[in-house]
Amino acid sequence: MHAGCYIELPREIMLKRAVINVRSNDNACFAWSVVAALHPAERNTNRELSYPHYTVLNLQDITFPMTLNQIKKFEHLNDISINVYGIKEKEILPIWLTSRKMEKHANLLYVQDPRDDNAEHFAYIKDLSRLVSSQINKKKCKKYFCDRCLHYFSSSERLQSHTTDCEKMNDCAIRLPSEDDKWLEEPHE
């Protein structure tokens, strides 16, 4: 997988106002998304000119369009942690999780163009809770999400205590049963 071209986000994601989609034409959408995370803009958050140029990042031996297998190297070069989430059947799911969360951290959304399988794109998730809370339940109360396993909590304190354990134990994303397999059937005698 590699990403680079600008792609408009799906309408249901745009309406949540949880993702910043920097409009660029240089195949460096990954770098622009990280810069948007590190240098938040007050206005015009979708414009390149609202941010310092992505050359503020160390991009030594990184090629664009970005691939998921280059992220670990990018994290090391820039002393930052990155999580990447994708969209599958209108749900947000983790597709790349950092091995160690750092003080400088960015959650990115990986999007594919529904009209062109070869067009892929990264955007910065500024509010993971806002982005994924509606897929958990329809209540409007604030939820605090673990960005590794997407489990949610009612308070930041509960999230903090969970995060310590989750980082130690959880090397993979939780996969829920499909719609067809979600019910356990007892054998009939």
Image (cartoon, helix red, strand yellow):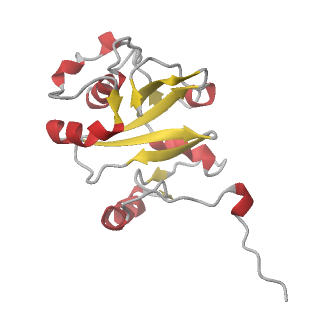
**Quadrant containing the N terminus in the rendered view:** top left
Q: Which residue ends up furthest to the right in the rendered image?
A: 189
* Residue at position x 29%, y 25% in the image: 31
Residue 88 in the image, given as x and y percentages of width and height: 58, 41
Residue 90 in which image quadrant: top right
* Residue at position x 41%, y 17% in the image: 46
* Residue at position x 65%, y 49% in the image: 139
Q: Foreground: 115 or 82? A: 115
Q: Residue 108, relative to residue 5: is it above or below?
A: below
Residue 7 in the image, given as x and y percentages of width and height: 50, 19
In the drawing, does residue 84 fall left or right of residue 89? left
Q: Foreground: 147 or 120? A: 120
Residue 39 in the image, given as x and y percentages of width and height: 26, 26
Does the image show residue 106? Answer: no
Does the image show residue 70? Answer: yes
* Residue at position x 22%, y 28% in the image: 62
Residue 13 in which image quadrant: top right
In the drawing, does residue 176 fall left or right of residue 160? right
Q: Residue 75, relative to residue 45: is it above or below?
A: below
**Quadrant containing the C terminus in the rendered view:** bottom right
Residue 104 in which image quadrant: top left
